Image (cartoon, rainbow, N blue to C red):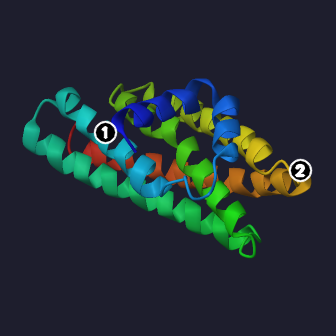
Amino acid sequence: MSLGKFFSAIISVLFRPRRYWQSVSLTAESEQSDVLKDYAVPVIALVQLLKFPLIGVPRMAMFFSIAVFLVDCAAMYLLLGGVSSFSELSDKKESTGAVMRILCHAMTPVWLVELLYFIHGWNLLFAVVAVAYALMLVRIGFSVMLKDDPERSAGLFRSTALLFTGVNIASFLVIMALVRLFNF
């Protein structure tokens, strides 16, 4: 994915999600790239690099960013594994790819809000707002990408929402523990 498409995807997911999901659902499966490699990991890495000036101490920032990068990647894989295990989509390869794409793109606000976790007292509010917005993105994504089966889309959203919220709460708590560990 080129740099222009990468930033365009971030902006589209955040501010025009319905239009973005419609354009993604129209693209052929052969044109779709590996969403983890081309979108999720670069967004996580970009956010970690943006933390360096906020922290100010290069060595501490490097260790903290590596630790949070691993936490974010683990949370993403935990979320994808959990959703794929209870989603009954194993017989439909295209639906599994669509769910993976939706979840990876919906995590964007959660990853971007990590930059605001250093504002003590407000970090919990920022995390709750980011998770709520991410759940809205998941809901829109499921309704657009899985429009052929609205009952399955609604059921999958209900079961995904609980796992999504739980994984993000655990991720937030681990990141806050790392903030305390590194004395930020």
Q: Residue furthest right?
A: 151
Residue 46's label in the rendered image is 1
Query: At 73% across and 38% down in the image, what residue appears?
Result: 140
Q: Position of residue 6 (x, y in %)?
A: 42, 37
x, y (%) of residue 147? 83, 47
The quarter in which the C terminus is drawn is top left
User: Which quadrant is home to the N terminus?
Assistant: top left
Label 2 element class:
helix
Residue at the disc numbered 2: 150
Cα separation between marks 2 and 1: 35 Å
- Give the quadrant of residue 84: bottom right
Q: Are marks 2 and 1 in contact (CB under 8 Å)?
A: no
The three-letter code of the residue at mark 1 reads Leu
Residue under the image location 70 percent in, 50 percent down: 161
The percent position of residue 75, horizontal first and vertical second, equals 47, 57
Residue 128 located left or right of residue 4:
right
Kindly state the secondary structure of the residue where label 1 is placed.
helix
Image position of 149 (left or right of 71)? right
Residue 176 shows in this picture: no
How many discs mark residues in the rendered view?
2
Residue 39 in sight: yes
